[in-house]
Image (spheres, rainbow, N blue to C red):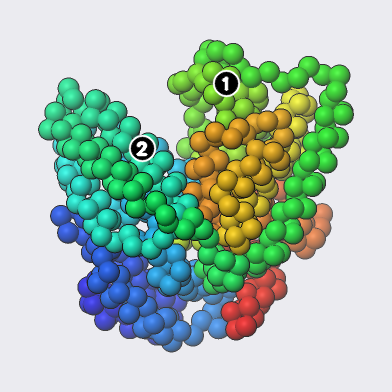
Amino acid sequence: MDNDKSETMSTGNKYEDLVGFFKKWREFQKPNVVNGVPDYTVQAMAEQKRLIPKLKRDLSAIDCSSWPIPQQVDYEIVRAEINGLEFDHRILKPWVRNPIFYAVIQMEEPDVPAREAPEIYGVLNVFESSFPLNEKDQAIFKGKLAAIPDILLQAKQNLIEEAGDLWLLANQKKKRESANLANLAGQLDASSPDLADLARRAQVAVDDFAVWLEQKRKGMKAFSGIGVAEFDRNMKEVHLVPYGWKEQVELIERELERSLASLALEEHRNRRLPALKAAGSLEEIQDRRKKSVAEFMSFLQNEGIFTVPDYMQLSDEVRVFIPPEQLDFFTHVMYRDPLVLGCHGVHWLEKQREKRNTHSIRSGALLYKIWDSRAEGLATAFEELMMQAGIFEEHPRAKELVYIMLAFRAIRAIGGLKLHSGEFTLEEAITYAVEKTPRGYIQPNSNMILQDYALYLSEPGYGSSYVIGKLQLDRLIADRATQLGERFQLKDFFDDYFARGVIPASLIRWEMTALDDEIQKLRKWRVE
């Protein structure tokens, strides 16, 4: 790590000083890259860790106490990001304990601000390019594909800590990466044979790494959680979520009970209606998806949910038909009524809005997933909010799917929380999900639930962010409705909400309501 990255971080007490500090901080946290290989070696990470206390001192020297609330919020964002890097060095250490971190290729764009799972700097994002590749993209692909064998060679040297479940789940991901590289090579054969050759060499390196992971994992302790105390610390210092492990379990268990009870009542109400049947052909699911997207976008505009600029669009494309026996949880829902997951598609509309965000600190994805409660909480809440607003009045049985979705997210969250506390093994968490999920939408061989638990072990709190973030949005709506009374308008609320950016839910609440009880709780929590 280049020492110069921290030497010029002089500070003052103006907001502009924070903005300048933020820009230098963002450069500091990036690893050095040599020939396309980011440096996560012991020496480089030790040097980065050594300089973190100076960063924290320099930030603390900026007195923001007299600033307006939005500027104080920006200060808290910067502090949370630095705490995220410190937490990585002290606890998570993905470069030495989590092989999932060494992702080398990504085929699909995430629907949230940044990739959910941890990944190295500079991954090859195939989805950012179109084929045949132009000259610029060919150069990018050449550099990144050529670097993959050396990246994985360094990974073998760096990965020295035991976390057997993470190593097992990483092995599954490497098999998918291998298949993706094989497909990419085939796609490049005709137009760029030299790149196709590099893709196949990268595939060989990935396959070799997968074998190495499997061999090293033998005899390794399986537990990969961080424990309740560190989970709590991560919530209060990094994610700025005012609920610790115990509170989250209690809140989520209550939401699980509510969703299951509500499901039973909806099923009773709809008992004389025909059951929802999964689409039976590609043409049928394409037709359902197309109609659901049109209905969702029309509902947003006609019912005044939030301002929908002309640039906002939601894809209605479906390319592949999945046979009934291969449906997993979300495809079970999608194939029965895609309007439910269409509501969750508010993610994509928000990404389009955020591309136009020019804020000096809030534009672009915040680091260390500190946006999770805000991004995932919104999309989860939006399903039930739109149901309450009336979008499913012509789809009565779709309301059952809304409660099934909420129940499933609560079930996943509880599984993830208990993986971190050590109350569940990975096998027990999977069994819990299979047994609790309504209608058998999760099977023991579900690839999706494995991927979910890989994420929740890698990113503590991500699994619970869907439900906790939903509850935080519920609370914010209640707060603003109480403050404004008859002046409360949903469109005004959401336009204001979106204008704040994708930042921790507790900070948005502070900005929008001026209520600082959650912030004071977090500050008191830090001291204790």
Looking at the picture, how far across and down is residue 469, in whole percent? 64, 55
Residue that appears at 66% across and 44% down: 432
Residue 268, located in which quarter of the rendered image? Answer: top right
Query: Does residue 232 appear anywhere in the picture?
Result: yes
Quarter holding the N terminus?
bottom left
**Crowd tier of the residue under label 2, counting other residues whose Cα lies within 10 Å: few below 14, some 14–19, many 20 or above:** some
Vertical position of residue 453 compared to residue 239: above or below: above
Quarter holding the C terminus?
bottom right
Vertical position of residue 239 compared to residue 217: above or below: below
Vertical position of residue 412 compared to residue 246: above or below: above
Looking at the picture, how far across and down is residue 413, in whole percent? 63, 51
Choose between 257 and 466: the one closer to the eye: 257
Residue that appears at 87% across and 28% down: 269
Choose between 403 and 520: the one closer to the eye: 403
**Crowd tier of the residue under label 1, counting other residues whose Cα lies within 10 Å: few below 14, some 14–19, many 20 or above:** few
Name the residue beneath numbered marker 1.
325
Residue 32, located in which quarter of the rendered image? Answer: bottom left
